[in-house]
Each structure stands twice: as C-alpha cells, then as structure tokens.
Amino acid sequence: MFLLLCVLLLFSGCSGKNTGAAQSAADNAVEDAATIAAEAERAAKERASLIAGSLDDRRLAAQVIISGIDGKGQLPQYMQDLLTECPAGGVMLFRYNLDTDNEAIQNLIAETAALIVSENGIPPFAAIDHEGGAVNRFRRGVADLPPAASYWDAAQNADNEIALAQINADSINAGTVIKRLGFNLNLAPVAEYINQNNRDFLEDRSYGADPFFAAAAAAAFIAGMEQVGVLCAVKHFPGSAGADPHRFPSILRGNKTALKALAAPFASLIQDGYARAIMVSHSMALALDGNIASLSPVIMDKWLRQEWGFEGIIICDDFSMAAANDSLNPATAAVRSLAAGADMVLVWPPDIRRTHRAIMAALDNGELSRERLQEAAARIIFEKIRLGIMD
C-alpha cells in the first residue's frame, strides 16, 4: 500500500509539473506572438510614414480624399480624367454604380483601382455604406443584411450572446461577398444607441437602447468584417440628433456629461481595439464647441485623439449635407476639417477637382501644414498595409 501511494504521489507531481510546463509554454507562445505582432505593426507604421513623406503635394492632397465616382461597369472618360488629376485615397460606390450584375461591379472597382495605382502607386480604399436593412446599396440578394434593430429585438427574446453570434456570422457572410466584389472599406456599423433624441433619424439603424449592447454588437460586426479583410468605419461620432443631417442642422444639446454618455459605445470600441476608423458627424455639440464635430479640433483632436487615445483614421461625413453646408462650400469645409484633425473627407464628383486644388493651395499658403497631412496619409496607408491592400 505504501509503495502504491508513493507511485500515485510521484505521478501526481509529474502531472502537475507537466501541466505547469505546458501552461508556461502556452504563455510564452502568446507573448512571442504578441511581440511579433507589435513589431510587424511598428514596421508597417514606419513604412507608411516613409511612403506618406515621399508623396508630392498633388498625391498627398489626393490621398486624404474619398471620392464618389460616376459610371456603371466602367469609368466614363471625364471620371478617368478627374482621377488621373486627383488619384484619390479612396472611392465610394452608391446604388447608381451598383444596380447591375456582380461582374460589372468588379470591373468598375478594378478599373478605378488600376487607374489610381498608375498615378500614385497606392491602391485606393473601395468604400461602401453597407449597414444592412434600408442602408443597402446593392440589388436584393447581394450581401443582404437585416437591420441593426432586429438583433436588439432578438436579444430581448433570447439572450445577448446568441444575438451577438448571429451579428458576427452575418457580418462574415456579407463581408465575404463585398470583399469578393472588390470592397475593402465599409462605412458601418452605427454604434450609437437609440434614444428619444436620435430615434427619428436613426430608426432601425441602431443596435438598440442599451449602450453596452450597442457597443458589443458593433464589435461583433467589425470582427466579422475584419476577419475577411474589410475595414469598418464606425459612425456617427459623437452622436446624431433627431433631424436628418442630409436636410437639416443637427444639434446635440446635452451637457458634457450627457455627451460622454452618448458616445460611450465609441469609447468602448476604442479601448477594446475594435475601432480602427471612425466617421465623425456634422452634429454640433453645443457644450463643447460652436463648430460642427467634423470641423472641431476640440472633438476630433482633443477628445478623440488626446483624451481617448484614438490612433486610427478619422473620416468626415459628406460636406454637401445640409448640416455641414451652412456657410462653407465643400472644398473649403474639407480643408478646415483636415486642419482640425480629420484624416479623410468624402467628396462628390462635381467637387473633386475643386477640393483637391483647395487642399494643395492650403498646403502652399500654410493654412494646412504638410506635417498634418502626412500624419493623415500615414494612418491611411498603414491600414492599407495592414489589410494587405498595398501588396
């Protein structure tokens, strides 16, 4: 009996040692992987900065523009001329480009990317608004997604984890389709939680009334898109009012505490590393600044960058919207937005040349520093390297 007990104790001790050794090896492997990933990111950022620093004014000014394009299946000649002059850092497609078969969509994106690469050597983001529900630019049956609110409804009837898993699965499926078509940037999801002040505008585009679920749902959506190689731009920071900003001014009237609470899902997504690009709204946060958010260094630089430590791309919504177009034309607004801390601005085809030239003029006269624009371009190029778009 004593001999048997000794054997059992010896086995137990060896087993414990083996388990400990295995755990230690696993921990070391995790640490090694983290070190390798950190080094790869450092090298990619260094490469991005070098590329941004090598760009002349024409190409640097173009890199911070996401341009809408005309054409279906192929670029019309005037669009080719515009993008030759301004090889934009990104292009964005809408329903009028996409109401066609998948092959035509692939051809249009491929032709556009090839033209831009021939001018500056840097492939563009190919962007789309693909939230699901009503915000779907494709024909029915192409990358369909249900509205965000439907997942909140499902969570009430089941549990959060099931709803979050479904968001992730649906995002992977839709992301796989849009990636195959040529898209690599999705201006989605909406991370704002629904409340009485924004309900009339957001409707079913929000993941519901709980800010914690809204953040978790947005994270699940982003994780799915990232898994298949699509960057997400979370929107609309710091929040939306009830008025549709396409048609009316958008004003957030809460105090600073209320504004921070409104933006809580964004804080969570930044802290947890999901938010790599954020779209800033044209809402005016009266407690912070007299400017709309997309023109506010207080909101973009002081709040997002300095206070919350956001290091990704800041994208500003379309400056032709009524909420942004009170006294500034889109070209002037774009320059002011970039100077205030934005990295990319959305531009429609009629405004591409004017905006591009306005940015170059601002570089020339000192209104916009080259350092500020190189910083923006480096963030853009880094994400293109990280996603494999550059290679």
Image (cartoon, rainbow, N blue to C red):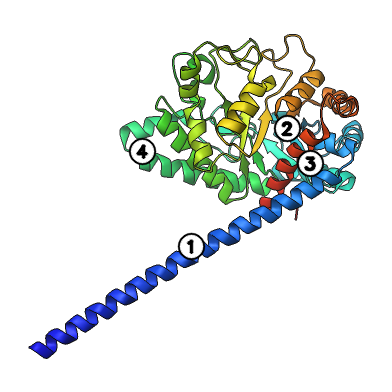
Quarter-of-image position of residue 247: top right
* Secondary structure found at label 3: helix
Q: Residue at x 84, y 47 (%)?
A: 114
What amino acid is labelled 1 in the image? Val
Foreground disc of the pair 3, 2? 2
Foreground disc of the pair 2, 1? 1
Q: Earlier in the sequence, mark 1 or mark 4?
A: 1
- Please identify the quadrant where the C terminus is shown: bottom right
The spot of residue 181 in percent (x, y) is: 69, 46
* Secondary structure found at label 2: strand
Foreground disc of the pair 1, 4? 1
Q: Earlier in the sequence, mark 2 or mark 1?
A: 1
Cα–Cα gap, marks 2 and 1: 35 Å
Q: Is residue 323 above or below residue 164?
A: above
Residue that extends furthest to the bottom in the rendered view of this protein: 3
Q: Is residue 249 left or right of residue 166?
A: right
Cα–Cα gap, marks 4 and 3: 40 Å
Disc 1 target residue:
30
Disc 2 target residue:
344
Disc 3 target residue:
108
Q: Is residue 185 above or below residue 20?
A: above
Q: Residues within 10 Å of mark 2 (few under 14, many from 20)?
A: many
- Please identify the quadrant where the N terminus is shown: bottom left
Q: Residues within 10 Å of mark 3 (few under 14, many from 20)?
A: many
Disc 4 target residue:
160
Foreground disc of the pair 4, 2? 2
Residues at discs 1 and 3 in contact (Cβ within 8 Å): no
The spot of residue 78 in percent (x, y) is: 91, 31
